[in-house]
Every structure is written in structure tokens, then in C-alpha cells.
């Protein structure tokens, strides 16, 4: 009966979720192979490197962060290693070079403890690194708040909703795109929403544990952050 109940629920989602194209439908409902979870596919030694711009005036609608330092034309490297004290956590070694010159004189690094479930913070962040880490939390890692739990990577699937001013809009998978960035070519699903006249987009690849690209705006059409994956080691 439990299996039947899950099947019926998925069919109902497919019927009412707006799924379109040649993918899942009422008669071809999504299944676990269509699910994506933050941090899935991370391994000991996985590295993700990004280029990131995130403005200090960004006021994240997903959490209370957002009024700290900017990261402009920055390079962000993250290496995940197993926490030797707790199998449920990762040690994320995060390095940041802030500024268009990408000088090592601007390099900052620290180790952040992240839970393997949803990559939430599992330990304190040092005061000296906090102003560098918080812009990453409200940009690259903001997906933790947008995608709470496993989500369907199928066109039409709603992941969340967002409010800007008096307007609330759905955050949905709206397209599939093949894109090429510095890290390579990827088949992606585009998570998007529109506040004001600008559409925010986050590109997600099935087997990559974090989004590979994003351009996010507020309701006043101001860029809040953008990033691209520059290299990826599984």
C-alpha cells in the first residue's frame, strides 16, 4: 500500500505540476531518478571552483544574511573532505580571492564544517572569516534555502515561492539547456522566477552537487549576485 500511495502522489504531482515537454507527465510520472538534492554526489576530495560577484546591498529573501562585504570578480574554491570526528559532516576548505586583479595578497581561507544533509552549517564560523563566508552563504550556498529537501529536476516542477514587495511568485524549473562554461559543457535544468522585469535563473546539472551558474535579481531589477563554475573535480 505504501508503494501504491507514493505512485499515486507522484502521478498527482505530474498532473498538476505543469510538467511539460517529452519528459514526465501523468502517464510517465517523475521518479527518484529525477530528484536532485543539495550536496548529493559529493565525495572525499571533491572540489568546486567558482567565479563570483555578490553585492553588499543584497538582502536575501531566503535568510537574514546579506548586509556584509561585497565579493566582486572573486574566485571561490571549495574542497570537501570527510570530517574525521563525525561521519555526518564535511570539512569544506574554502579559499577566496576578492578583486579583479586576483592577487594572492587578497587570499583568505578557512575550514567550515557542513552537514552532509543539505550542507547546513554544523559548526561556528570564525569572526575573521565571517565577512567572506556570509556572501557565499547568500549566493552559491543560497540554494540550501531554496531547495529544502529533494526536488524534481523536471520542467514545470515548483521548488519554492518568493515574495518581493507585495508580489509572491513561484520558483520553478522552467527549461532544459545545454550550456558551456569554463568548467565544461553541461546538460542543465533552469530554476527561475521573475520579480520586476528581470528573471532570475539558477542552472543545475543532475550530477553536480551545487548549481553551476546563477544570475539573481531583486524586485527593483538590481543584480544581487552571479556566479559560474570554473572547474569541478568529482
Image (tube, rainbow, N blue to C red):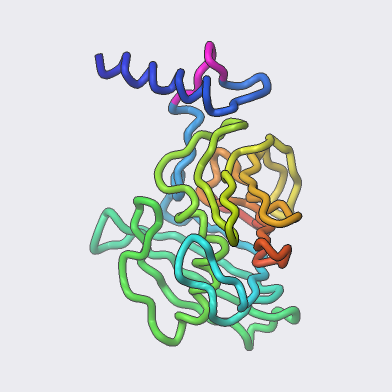
Q: Foreground residue, 209 or 46?
A: 209
Q: Is residue 21 above or below residue 91?
A: above
Whether residue 230 is visible to the viewer of this picture, yes or no, is no
Q: Is residue 63 above or below residue 4?
A: below
Q: Residue furthest top?
A: 27
Q: Please give left or right for residue 1 compared with residue 119 in the image.
A: left
Q: Foreground residue, 2 or 36?
A: 2
Residue 49 lies in the magenta stretch:
no
Residue at image position (50%, 18%) is 29
Q: Position of residue 143 (x, y in %)?
A: 51, 54
Q: Please give left or right for residue 206 compared with residue 40 in the image.
A: right
**Image quadrant in which you'd find residue 21:** top right
Q: Foreground residue, 200 or 90?
A: 200
Q: Residue furthest front?
A: 166
Whether residue 102 is visible to the viewer of this picture, yes or no, is yes
Magenta residues?
A: 25-31
The majority secondary structure of the magenta stretch comes to: loop
Q: Position of residue 15 (x, y in %)?
A: 52, 20
Q: Is residue 117 above or below residue 165?
A: above
Q: Please give left or right for residue 67 compared with residue 50 in the image.
A: left
Labels in figure, total:
0
Residue at image position (63%, 62%) is 50
Question: Which quadrant holds the N terminus?
Answer: top left
Q: Please give left or right for residue 165 compared with residue 89 in the image.
A: right
Residue at image position (66%, 59%) is 216
Residue at image position (50%, 34%) is 152
Q: Foreground residue, 17 or 111?
A: 17
Q: Position of residue 233 (x, y in %)?
A: 56, 52
Q: Position of residue 178 (x, y in %)?
A: 73, 38
**Image quadrant in which you'd find residue 175:** top right
Amino acid at each position: 500500500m505504501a508503494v501504491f500511495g507514493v505512485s499515486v502522489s507522484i502521478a498527482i504531482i505530474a498532473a498538476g505540476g505543469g510538467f511539460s515537454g517529452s519528459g514526465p507527465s501523468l502517464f510517465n510520472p517523475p521518479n527518484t531518478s529525477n530528484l536532485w538534492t543539495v550536496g548529493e554526489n559529493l565525495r572525499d576530495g571533491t572540489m568546486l571552483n567558482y567565479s563570483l560577484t555578490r553585492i553588499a546591498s543584497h538582502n536575501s529573501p531566503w535568510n537574514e544574511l546579506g548586509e556584509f562585504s561585497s565579493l566582486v570578480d572573486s574566485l571561490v574554491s571549495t574542497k570537501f573532505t570527510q570530517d574525521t570526528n563525525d561521519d555526518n559532516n564535511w570539512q569544506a576548505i574554502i579559499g577566496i580571492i576578492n578583486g579583479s586583479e586576483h592577487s594572492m595578497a587578497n587570499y583568505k581561507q578557512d575550514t567550515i564544517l557542513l552537514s552532509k544533509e543539505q550542507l547546513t552549517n554544523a559548526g561556528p564560523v570564525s569572526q575573521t572569516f565571517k565577512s567572506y563566508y556570509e556572501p557565499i552563504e547568500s549566493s552559491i550556498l543560497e540554494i540550501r534555502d531554496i531547495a529544502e529537501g529533494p526536488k524534481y529536476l523536471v520542467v514545470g516542477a515548483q521548488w519554492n515561492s518568493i515574495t518581493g514587495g507585495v508580489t509572491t511568485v513561484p520558483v520553478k524549473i522552467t527549461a532544459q539547456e545545454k550550456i558551456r562554461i569554463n568548467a565544461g559543457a553541461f546538460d542543465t535544468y533552469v530554476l527561475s522566477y521573475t520579480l520586476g522585469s528581470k528573471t532570475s535563473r539558477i542552472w543545475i546539472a543532475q550530477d553536480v552537487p551545487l548549481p553551476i551558474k546563477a544570475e539573481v535579481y531583486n524586485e527593483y531589477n538590481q543584480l544581487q549576485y552571479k556566479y559560474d563554475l570554473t572547474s569541478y573535480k568529482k
